[in-house]
Image (cartoon, helix red, strand yellow):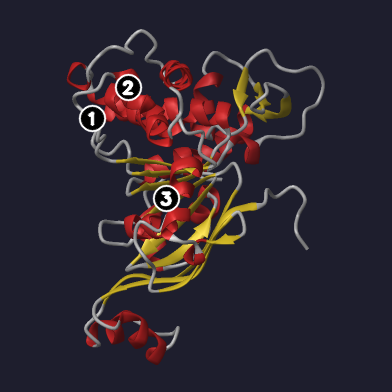
Amino acid sequence: MTDPATPPAKLVCRHVWKLFGARAAEVLADLGPEADGERLQAAGLVPAVRDVTLSVREGEIFVIMGLSGSGKSTLVRLMSRLIEPTAGEILFNGQNLLTASDREMVEIRRHKMGMVFQHFALLPHLSVLDNVAFPLQVQGVARGLREERARAMVALVGLAGREGAMPRQLSGGQQQRVGIARSLAVEPELWFLDEPFSALDPLIRREMQDEFIRLQSVLRKTIVFITHDFDEAIRLADRIAIMKDGAVVQEGTPEEIVLHPATDYVREFTRSVPRAKVVRVARAMRPPEGAAPGVSVAARASVAEAAALFLDGTTVLAATDDAGGVVGHLHRDDVVRLMLGG
């Protein structure tokens, strides 16, 4: 039975494979779904994605992570059919994308999907405003309407006043903000981000993560976010899928993956992560009792982020939801026990 509190699936992958090489589909059919990497390689194939089944829920940030060569970027391109799968099903709003025509896929990508990649790919001869408005121009939206929409997106990512600037006049972080604004201009239902912050300096990267969290609190998009950085994953994700050699080896919340690793690979991957960094306030808080404390923290924040608020002698924090309502109380004693390994 479906939990009514669980949002419906926006995107579903069922037994998705991507093998590079001659007669890949025929070889896979002969070997069967239990085919391992060694047998596929012996048949002259390169297994990029192996038998991936997962679902992305509406309104969540779903992070796919793994080391270089794990298959995560290939998987996200399969999800949007920029690359054709060898086998499997990919359902978007219940529609099997593998049965959609090329024309239908172009329309779906133009109107329902947004994409941001590691390289900003801004058009150097266009201003910030025109870069952001470009996908709307491709859609045939009238100039006045597309510029109005573009200005709203530029303001949303914090670049109001820079609409006339050229890409060469912007910092790396500002250029990435333009890329984000451009992808949002079409008001996508599903947003793909493939290592969008990995080319940025650490300080700018942290600022962009903060900005991303702020945008998501406003927009509530369904997001597939690719990264190889576990710190970034646990900071942003509602759920995480960890890939190794083309296969998903564990899927779950950041807390589940760190506290209950499913394999030795995941255990090694997460070994150095402090528990307080992944456990959210929502998990550590108690039901609210009495008057609300004067100091608050977001329920989705990590316990480590909340810990600094106790330094002035505060003993209880109010935990709040995205709308600012109090949903629980976080006690200093509970935080101390957790941070000491309890």
Q: Nearer the viewer, residue 100 or 263?
A: 100
Looking at the image, which is closer to me, 4 or 17?
17
> Residue 33, located in which quarter of the rendered image?
bottom left
Q: Relative to 18, does residue 341 appear above or below in the rendering?
A: above
Q: Amino acid at mark 1?
A: Leu
Which numbered tag is attached to residue 175? none
Q: Distance of mark 2 from mark 3, alpha carbons? A: 21 Å
Q: Nearer the viewer, mark 3 or mark 1?
A: 3
Which quarter of the rendered picture does the N terminus lie within? bottom right
Would you name the residue on which mark 2 appears? 130
Q: How many residues crowd around disc 3 within 10 Å: few (fewer than 14), some, or many (20 or more)?
A: some
Q: Does the residue at mark 2 contact the one at mark 1 (Cβ under 8 Å)?
A: yes
Identify the image quadrant of the C terminus: top right
Left or right for 84, reference 202:
right
Q: Going 29% across and 83% down the picture, which residue do you hit?
A: 23
Q: Which residue is mark 1?
A: 123
> Which of the marked residues, 3 or 1, is nearer the chain's N terminus?
3
- Tag on residue 106? 3
Which SS class for mark 2?
A: helix
